Amino acid sequence: MTINNRGLFGQPILPYIDYRSYAGADVFLDLTFLDHTGTPQTPTSATYQLDDMTNATNMIPQTTFTPTQSTYTLQIPGSQLPMTHSWQGSQVCQFTLSAVLPDTSTVLSIVILELCAIQQPSSSGAFEF
């Protein structure tokens, strides 16, 4: 879910993309790689990592992948997106992407991903996060 209508609710427009997802659910990020003139480019390599900013913990170490074209959908498996602490209702994560373009320039992008807990009934009948 993309949160892009913050201004309608009296909240500031953020200088970065802000996503929300349930913990443990796959996340799909649609990436488009452009050079400084706005021309689509296919990177020669790209790396990403995911950090839990709420708890100051690295969730996904630096991972390298090779996009096959200038537009690419990156899937992050839900198994890599658990809550750091099961008692928290949500946690704010930072997704950092770095890509090297054919002209050897490097582009950097940061996305904020808020993971939200899903309540689960326990064996005692009470709800747990």
Image: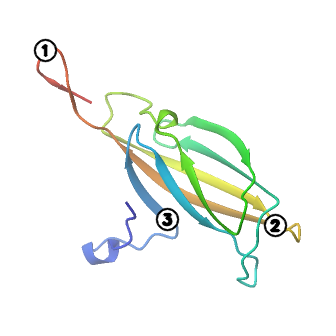
Q: Position of residue 29 (x, y in %)?
A: 53, 58
- Name the residue located 56 percent from the left edge and 36 percent from the top edge: 59
Q: Which residue is mark 1?
A: 124
Judge left or right: residue 95 versus residue 107. left
- Kindly indicate the quadrant of the structure image that contains residue 45: bottom right
Q: What is the number of the mark on residue 17?
A: 3
Which element carries disc 1, helix, strand or loop?
A: loop
Label 3 element class = strand
- N-terminal label among 1 and 3: 3
- Mark 3 / mark 2, whichever is N-terminal: 3
Mark 2 closeness class: few <14, some 14–19, many ≥20 residues within 10 Å: many
Residue type for callout 3:
Ile
**Residue in the foreground of this view, choosing between 41 and 56:** 41
Separation of residues labelled 3 and 2 (CA atoms): 22 Å
Residue furthest front in the image: 68
Find the distance from the CA under tag 1 to the CA under tag 3.
40 Å
Asked whether 29 or 85 is in front, the reply is 29
Residue that badge 2 annotates = 101
Q: Is residue 52 above or below residue 29?
A: above
Mark closer to the observer (3, 2):
2
